[in-house]
Amino acid sequence: KNKDELYKEILRNEMDFIFKEMLKKVENINGVREKLHSMFETEYLLLRGDINLSEVLIKPFENSDREIKNIVEEFYERQRKMIRQILQEGVEKDEVVIDDVSLLSLAMMAAGQGLFSYFRDIKDEKKAIKSMGYLIDTLFCGIAARKGRV
């Protein structure tokens, strides 16, 4: 209909593309940790590209358009659901023990948002990916000292 509608359709298409790519990357991976690494890395690399959705996700409060805010909310809800599904599979396979999968998926989504916002403009892609991996590993291993651990 107009430029605004076209822009919103581009945002939706970019979002669909990102989630299709993330699903493709994780579908043949075994293991919760590995799936989460792959999911976050894929998302990060795609959003780091020159796409419109990246700008909207970084500055969601700068946009007063309700429909664009809905697109941002949908993106994060889809991300949270994907994380929750990966975590739930791990629980069902006795790979992980999680008291509240929904709460942890929300926390991981929020952590991922923060990391992406921070690392998006950093040129060192490897450092950013390593940091995301570190977050996932920390969630898996915790930070508590363990006997026999250096």
Image (cartoon, helix red, strand yellow):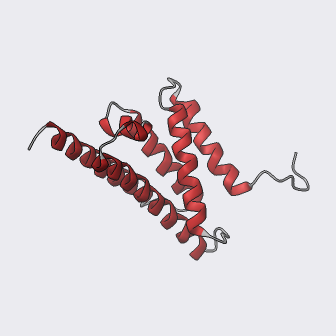
**Picture residue at 67% right of the left edge, 72% below the top:** 99
Instruction: Say which quadrant the C terminus sits in.
Output: top right
Measured along the vertical axis of the image, is residue 77 above or below residue 57? below
Measured along the vertical axis of the image, is residue 90 above or below residue 1? below
What residue occupies the far top of the structure in this picture?
123
Q: Is residue 142 visible?
A: yes
Left or right: 3 with respect to 67? Answer: left
Q: Is residue 24 visible?
A: no
Rendered image quadrant of residue 46: top left
Rendered image quadrant of residue 31: bottom right
Q: Position of residue 110 (x, y in %)?
A: 55, 50
Instruction: Say which quadrant the N terminus sits in.
Output: top left
**Picture residue at 45% right of the left edge, 63% below the top:** 81
**Picture residue at 42% right of the left edge, 58% below the top:** 77
What residue occupies the far left of the structure in this picture?
1
Task: Please name whichever residue, 132 or 62, is drawn nearer the observer in this view of the structure.
Answer: 62
Measured along the vertical axis of the image, is residue 99 above or below residue 128? below
Q: Position of residue 97 (x, y in %)?
A: 68, 70
Q: Position of residue 40 (x, y in %)?
A: 49, 47
Measured along the vertical axis of the image, is residue 73 above or below residue 101? above
Q: Position of residue 96 (x, y in %)?
A: 65, 68
